[in-house]
Image (cartoon, helix red, strand yellow):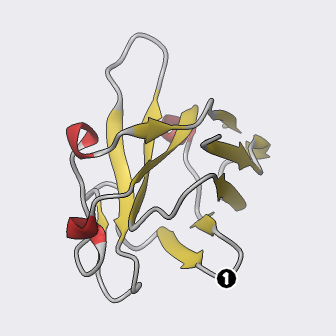
């Protein structure tokens, strides 16, 4: 059974940090990424990483504040978020794909991912 389980969300003050985790099980996922959705807004891309970790991609608004990483031995992906802003408040979703196109390349489009987690809420207070 394929599962993606996010954790690490919570309430933090502006300027603070959080680390999100996504534990995958059930099959090998070459491509993994994070997306988020704020109330009343569409889901948007946050960051993505290839299987090898050599390729990463970030949305421009997060670049320099967020760092994506993965530990394939643990089948877990991480998103280290720092200098958080109130506008980062959203439900954060883990996405994964078994496609080998994600072996060397970070995939940044939601349509490229077949599997999604349930989400973890991040709330940044001002």
Describe residue 72's horizontal placement relative to residue 56 as left or right.
right
Q: Quadrant of the C terminus?
A: top right
Residue sitting nearer the eye, 32 or 28: 28
Quarter-of-image position of residue 21: bottom right
Residue displayed at 29% across by 81% down? 55
Q: Which secondary structure lies at badge 1?
A: loop
Q: Is residue 6 above or below residue 107?
A: above
Residue sitting nearer the eye, 56 or 88: 56
Quarter-of-image position of residue 76: bottom right
Residue displayed at 28% across by 59% down? 99
Q: Is residue 55 above or below residue 96?
A: below
Q: Is residue 72 above or below residue 116?
A: below
The number of numbered badges drawn on the structure is 1
Q: Quadrant of the N terminus?
A: top right
Confirm whether residue 58 shows in the render: yes
Residue 57's x, y, as percent?
A: 28, 68
Confirm whether residue 62 shows in the render: no
Residue displayed at 77% across by 51% down? 8
What residue is pinned by disc 1? 73
Describe residue 103's horizontal placement relative to residue 51 as left or right.
left
Residue sitting nearer the eye, 113 or 14: 113
Residue 31's x, y, as percent?
A: 36, 63
């Amino acid at each position: 059974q394929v599962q993606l389980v996010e954790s690490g969300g919570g309430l933090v003050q502006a300027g603070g940090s959080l680390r999100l985790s996504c534990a995958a099980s059930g099959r090998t996922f070459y491509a993994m990424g994070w997306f988020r959705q704020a109330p009343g807004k569409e889901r948007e891309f946050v960051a993505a990483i290839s299987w090898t970790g050599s390729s990463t991609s970030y949305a421009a608004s997060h670049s320099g504040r967020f760092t994506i990483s993965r530990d394939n031995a643990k089948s877990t992906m991480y998103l280290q978020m720092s200098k958080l802003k109130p506008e980062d408040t959203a439900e954060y979703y883990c996405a994964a794909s078994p496609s080998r196109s994600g072996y060397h390349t970070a995939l940044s489009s939601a349509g490229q991912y077949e599997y999604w987690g349930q989400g973890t809420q991040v709330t940044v207070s001002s």
